Amino acid sequence: MSARSGTIAVLRRTRDGFTLAELLVSVFVLAIIIFLVAQVMTSATAITRTGHKHIDTDTQARVVFDRMALDFAQMVNRTDVDYYVKQRSGYSGHGNGHGWGRGHNGDLGSDQLAFFTQVPGYYPDGYTPGQQSPICLVAYRVNESSSSNPAYTRLERMAKGLVWNAVDTNTNQNTAKYPIVFLPQTIAGIGRPWAPAINNDNNANNSSDPDYEVIGPGVFRFEYYYLLKNGRVTDWPWDRSDFPDQLTISNPQQIGLSQVEAIAVSIAVIDPAGRALINAVSPDRILDLAADMADFRSARGRGVGGQRIGDLEAQWKGVVESIAQTGQTPSGLPVPPEAAKGIRIYNRYFDLKTF
């Protein structure tokens, strides 16, 4: 082979390879591709994680609302029985949300609700164990007794088995079937066994009632209000223009819930991981967060004439979004932003039977 041919062969082999610049460009492009793929995978993981959180909260909300739907559907709708519901007077279950933005200061962070309903309930321990009653006192509350209580800052439901008043009038605890009471007796004034429905402390005579059970382990905020038959939403279960001097649903006139078309219930639900993050800061911090979620009465518009459907829930969502961005509640208390991503707000209207 001639020298010229050898030179040509060497040049051909040289042209078949890559230059250093080409290799560097290739490595750079490959690095960009790997980075983009990693970003996509990270985003997909974050979306999946958020989706799992929402599935958990969605499931809890569905369970709570389905149970409430059954209770409300069988409510004893009469003007001669009492309901422990928010009204102008005689109700001490308003949440600390009235403070709006001041954090939890010892008041209740959520509403309470109790009424008589014809759903199965169980008689007290010591009287026909396991036997179901034809009527019961149903109560809902967020337990705010003590951080040592496993139910602390979780939604509870009580179904106290009762009988009609003419059957048994013995109200001694654990010795007889409790009777339903009729006006002028009220749930707030009769004492046991109704006292546990309207007290939210750790008093042995009140909140220790064994018939309470956790129904919403992720529900830390519970609020309700009324849709009247004239289309208004309000925190009093009657139209103030129709009954300007009415103090309660039984005084001075026994109107019951005759003007209420539906009860609207709003809840805030947090997934277990988010709750764990908040509890790591302080076991009471979730109550501070709940207190910054405005009560219906203190929300913008103050009810009749200015409050619109959806305003309350929008304010709550604003609190959650603010925490996710700033890492603190509106009152300035630190909350992990990641915990806020596990909070969702839900609302449902429950139609009542007309009188």
Image (spheres, rainbow, N blue to C red):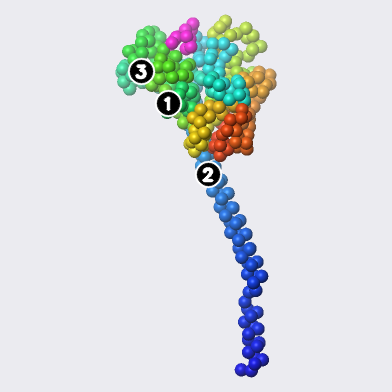
Give me the disc on residue 149.
1
Residue at left offset 56%, top offset 6%: 251
- Asked if one can make out residue 179 in the rendered structure from this viewpoint, the answer is yes
Sequence order check, earlier mark of 3 and 1: 3
Give the answer, above or below, for where 150 lies relative to 181. Answer: below
Q: Which residue is at the front of the view, 204 or 229?
A: 204
Name the main secondary structure of what is drawn in magenta. loop
Q: Which residue is mark 2?
A: 49
Image marks 2 and 1: residues in contact by CB distance under 8 Å: no
Q: Amino acid at mark 2?
A: Arg
Between disc 3 and disc 2, the foreground one is 2
**Above or below for 285 versus 1:** above
> As drawn, is 172 to the left or to the right of 293?
left
Question: On the image, numbered disc 3 is attached to which residue?
Answer: 124
Instruction: Find the magenta span and give its range.
Output: 180-191
**Distance Cα–Cα, label 2 vs label 1:** 29 Å
Q: Is residue 192 magenta?
A: no
Which residue occupies 54% across, 23% down? 109
User: Which kind of residue does numbered mark 1 sit on?
Assistant: Asn
Q: Is residue 296 visible?
A: no
> Closer to us: mark 3 or mark 1?
1
Residue 329 image position (x, y, % from top left): 60, 31
Magenta span contains residue 188:
yes
The residue under the point 39% across, 21% down is 211
Label 3 vs 2, first from the N-terminus:
2
Label 3 – label 2 distance at C-alpha: 43 Å
* Comes first in the chain, label 2 or label 1: 2
Mark 2 vs mark 1: give the one in front: 1
List the single residue furthest toward the bottom: 2
Question: Where is the C terminus found, in terms of image quarters?
Answer: top right
